[in-house]
Image (tube, grey):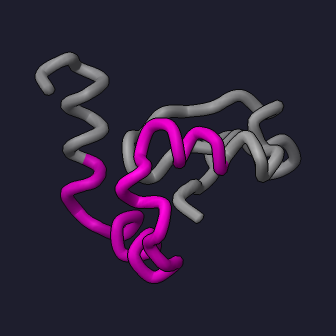
Amino acid sequence: MGFTWYGNENCPQPECIACGVKLSNAAMVPSKLKRHLLKKHDHLANKNVDYFKQLLSSPNKESVIFEKRLGTK
């Protein structure tokens, strides 16, 4: 739906594929993930799973997230 996970397999935490925001473990509830997608990325709400798979595997994704963390974007 637009999220992947990071951290320990026993206690994964969601990460938004579109913006790289790491959400709390409490946000693993589908309704909260959907709310993030609709509020922050409403233009992506109707995209299919293949779009997000491609976005996740995109080589540019890592550089965009890295730039956001450095504050250069």
* In the depicted structure, whether residue 68 falls above or below residue 31: above
Front residue of this view, candidates 33 and 10: 33
Residue at figure coordinates x 71%, y 28% from the top left? 24
Residue 73 among those drawn in magenta? no
Location of residue 39 with respect to 56 vertically, above or below: above
Image side of residue 57 versus residue 70, left or right: right
Quarter of the rendering containing residue 68: top left
Determine whether, in the image, residue 56 is placed left or right of residue 30: left
Quarter of the image containing the C terminus? top left
Residue 48, image x, y percentages: 49, 78
Give the main secondary structure, helix, strand or loop, of the magenta stretch.
helix
**In the image shown, does 68 or 2 lie closer to the viewer?**
2
Span shown in magenta: 34-62
Q: Residue at x 64, y 42 (%)?
A: 35
Which quadrant would residue 27 be assigned to in this image? Answer: top right
Image coords of residue 51 (percent x, y): 39, 76
Tell which of 48 and 17 is nearer to you: 48
The percent position of residue 33, horizontal first and vertical second, equals 67, 46
Residue found at the far left of this picture: 72
Q: Is residue 68 left or right of residue 20?
A: left
Tell which of 10 and 28 is nearer to you: 28
